[in-house]
Image (spheres, rainbow, N blue to C red):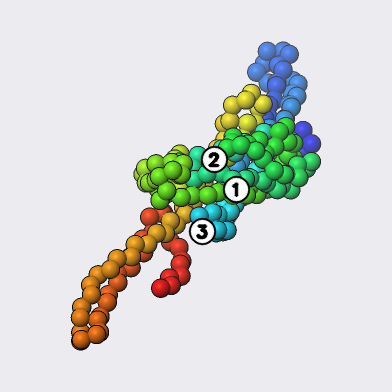
Amino acid sequence: AGPEGTPGEGLYNESQLDTNDDGVPDEEDNVCADVPYFTLEKDLGTITQTGPRSWTVSYDIEVCNIGGAEGTYDLMDTPDFDDDIVIDGVSYTSDAAGTAGGALTGNGPWTLDDDQTLVPGACYNYELSVDVTMDIFDINSPGDESYTACGAGGTASGSAGEGLYNTAALDTNNDGMTGIEDDACGDLPAFTHVKDLTSITQTGATTWDVTYTITVNNEGGATGAYGLED
């Protein structure tokens, strides 16, 4: 409401000086300052199957400053998937100033931004893309060969070790500790099938009726589609 601020704004503070001890201020002065206030939102984007046991998974991350002053932050991302899911590659893009994104290495945590400045009322967006493989049917593949779906532990949004659980975190005072976090989780299907000879029934001198039973199972955590041929 004014260049020096008014009560109820930011860090508005007023001093009053009574120079003749009559209880009535003779001089007043005030000062006002603002602080940044960061918000973080992370959502699961898309899950695209790229092979029989492989997918590309995307996550959307938005960092906003809804405070009244410019501030800086570091943005980290940590995958904590079901142990049967293997990370094959990861990259990200961003519209943040000076941060175009690129390829990331290892299994995380990954640093998506460092000492990024954000002005009041602005937001920056990041898209993380992770290539994964999962095989819960081969005992020689990584993991315990048992899929744990998002929410299996009782937390609706998922928790560590479930599905494609992933956490984004902000460090807003550069102390190496993350104080603002948000997570997202998604699931993968896992199809297998078993075929059995059910019966052979002779119906004539040189004719038989042969029956086969085919059972298709989805042992993953998400609905999926398949084609079946015989």
Residue 189 drawn at (x, y percent) = 44, 57
Residue that label 2 marks: 79
Could you tell me how far apart the alpha carbons at marks 2 and 1 are, in whole angstroms? Answer: 10 Å
Disc 1 is placed on an element classified as strand
Q: Is residue 113 above or below residue 191?
A: above
Disc 2 is placed on an element classified as strand
Disc 3 is placed on an element classified as loop
Question: CB atoms at circles 3 and 1 under 8 Å apart?
Answer: no
Rendered-image quadrant of the N terminus: top right
Q: Which of pointers 2 and 1 lies earlier in the amino acid sequence?
A: 2
Q: Which of pointers 3 and 1 lies earlier in the amino acid sequence?
A: 3
Q: Residue at x 37, y 62 (%)?
A: 193
Identity, as a three-letter code, of the amino acid under mark 1: Val
Q: Report crowding for label 2: few under 14, some 14 to 19, many 20 or more residues within 10 A (C-alpha).
A: many
Number of numbered markers: 3
Residue 52 or residue 130, whichever sits in front: 52
Q: Is residue 218 rendered to the left or right of residue 167?
A: left
